[in-house]
Image: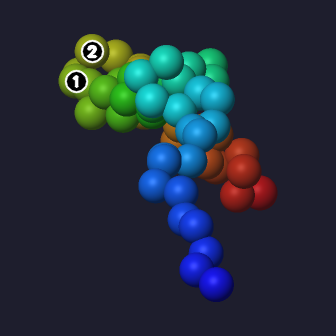
Amino acid sequence: MPVRTTTSCPASAPGDGAAARLPWWGLALPVLAFVTLLLLVSDPAAGPGPGDLFTRLAQFAGR
């Protein structure tokens, strides 16, 4: 006896497609990483900057 098959597409899960929303950290983490890297490569002649802060944090974490 032949079996019937359906040709319709399966229902998509809610949140799929253009209406999907990003969690808050999905945008916050890349922005934070970009700003951090931008500050690290900024001009060190402008005075003690974030590079000095990260150096001190690394020294503190290494203890």
Farthest-out residue, right: 63
Mark 2–mark 1 CB contact (< 8 Å): yes
Quick one: 6 or 50, which is closer to the camera? Answer: 6
Q: Neighbour class for label 2 at 10 Å: few (<14), some, many (≥20)?
A: few
Q: Secondary structure at mark 1?
A: loop
x, y percent for residue 11:
59, 40
Please give the residue where the numbered disc 2 appears in the rendered image: 46
> Is residue 43 left or right of 48 when viewed as pictured?
left
Residue located 64% across and 84% down the image: 1
Residue located 53% across and 24% down the image: 20
Residue located 45% across and 29% down the image: 17
Above or below 62: residue 30: above
Model colouring: rainbow
Farthest-out residue, bottom: 1
Q: Secondary structure at mark 2?
A: helix
Q: Amino acid at mark 2?
A: Ala
Quick one: 13 or 39, which is closer to the camera? Answer: 13
Above or below 9: residue 19: above
Q: Taking the image as drawn, is residue 17 in sight?
A: yes
